[in-house]
Image (cartoon, rainbow, N blue to C red):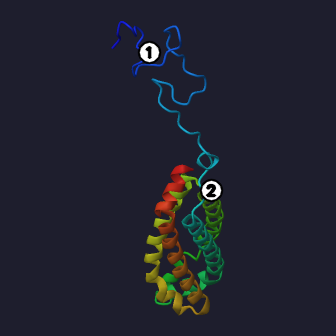
Amino acid sequence: MTTPHDPYNQQGGGSQQQPGGYPQQPQQGHPQQPGYPPQAPPLSQGELARPARPKSVDTAFMLWMVGAGVGILSSIISFITVQAIYDELLKDVDPSLRGSVPSPGYGGAIFSLILSAVWILIVFQMRNGANWARIVLAVLGGIGVIGGLVGLLSFGVLFSIGFFGVIQALLSLVSLAVTIGALIFMFKPDANHYFKAS
């Protein structure tokens, strides 16, 4: 409140004034000017850059690569064992009906080799933070787990054809285990943060 002796309220707690009764102008570059919120600090280089790849993503990558290697090896062995499996399955079939049963095909093994090559490309994209690659791997990996569990029913036939059948059965177990492990590591909390930030 002004008084007759202090018409510009120079003694009170009001705004500072220059001699002559004019309000003092704020200094240039003053960090907090009246009426403006403080400025946010600039983002650091670490906040602007892509987050570091977590260990869970690297572990999932390694497991997927092991799975691809096992798939390639299993495809190669299936070239060797396909005829033996065919003969084992037909040994209880009436000889007169064997001519009507189609001969074993190698198309499945060739398709598996091509699929393994594409699989490796998708795994590299997943490691680089592509969420679409993670989704593709999750869908195909889930189908692979179901197929692997169903494939356990054929272990009797595989063990009956000898050494290569046993190797193929063991490779199926390894493939099932690494696929389940890769799926788990790919969806850990730190991996989820990495894919969202990428």
The location of residue 79, given as percent across then percent down, is 65, 79
Q: Nearer the viewer, residue 12 or 58?
A: 12
Circle 1 is placed at which residue position?
10
Residue 188 showing in the rendered view: yes
Q: Is residue 8 above or below residue 59?
A: above
* Residue type (three-letter) at the residue carrying disc 2: Asn
Q: Nearer the viewer, residue 17 or 145?
A: 17
> Circle 1: is it few (<14), some (14-19), or many (20+) Cα within 10 Å?
some
The location of residue 45, given as percent across then percent down, is 64, 47
> Circle 2: is it few (<14), some (14-19), or many (20+) Cα within 10 Å?
some
Circle 2 is placed at which residue position?
128
Q: Residue at x 61, y 45 (%)?
A: 44
Q: Residue at x 33, y 14 (%)?
A: 1
Give the image quarter of residue 117: bottom right
Res. 97 mark: none
74 sits left or right of 147 in the view: right
Residue 95 showing in the rendered view: no
